[in-house]
Image (cartoon, rainbow, N blue to C red):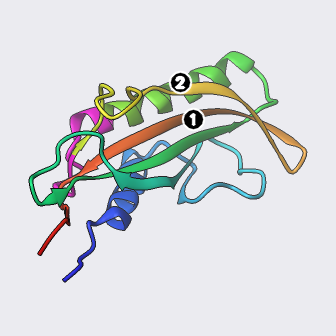
Amino acid sequence: MTTTVGAGDVLRELHNIAKRLGVFAVARVGEFRNAPPNGVCFAVWAEQLGAAATGHGLASTTPLFQGTARLYVPGFRKPDDDLEVELLTAADLYLGALSGGFSLRGLARNVDLLGEQGEPLNWKFGHINIDNKISRMADMSINVVLKNEWTQAE
């Protein structure tokens, strides 16, 4: 019998971590399709779900969930240095929360902090134009090795 490996629960927990931090004006699952509101905003969504490169058993496949987290801050306001500090502080807090809770409350074997399954956790900063409004943003790819496995043979 095929069962779920809990990828949806992992996505929900990545969102809940942001909500629990209490620093985001908005935290949501899914990208913003319209310009985000004022304040530092957070979004997380799924990118890929498939087999991890390592960690498999003899009769099972270890799943790897890959998601993207994005921070947004309206791009034009004064003073500019406050905007940058707010964004960097929020990025620091979220990265620290993932590092400190790398099993996602028992839902995952581990968040791939150091890049065993790809790239280590890190934020990449830039700008994005949504609805002709520029936001300062940061993206982070999050690889999560799931605890549950897919059975190869029954």
Quarter holding the C terminus? bottom left
Q: Report the disc number at residue 92.
A: none
* Relative depth, front residue between 83 and 146: 146
Q: Amino acid at mark 2?
A: Leu
Q: Residue at x 48, y 42 (%)?
A: 23
Whole-percent x and y of residue 84? 63, 21
Furthest-right residue in this view: 132
Front residue of 7 and 50:
50
**Which residue is label 2 attached to?**
88
Circle nearer the N terminus (1, 2): 2
Residues drawn in magenta: 97-109
The residue shown at (54%, 58%) is 28
Relative placement, left or right, of 6 versus 25 is left
The answer to whether mark 1 and mark 2 are in CB contact below 8 A is no
Q: In this orientation, which residue lies closer to the viewer: 113 or 73? A: 113
Kindly indicate the quadrant of the structure image that contains residue 136.
Answer: top right
Looking at the figure, which quarter contains the N terminus? Answer: bottom left
Q: Residue furthest bottom?
A: 1
Q: Is residue 103 magenta?
A: yes
Q: Give the quarter of the image for residue 114.
A: top left
Circle 1 residue: 139
Label 2: few (<14), some or many (≥20) within 10 Å? some
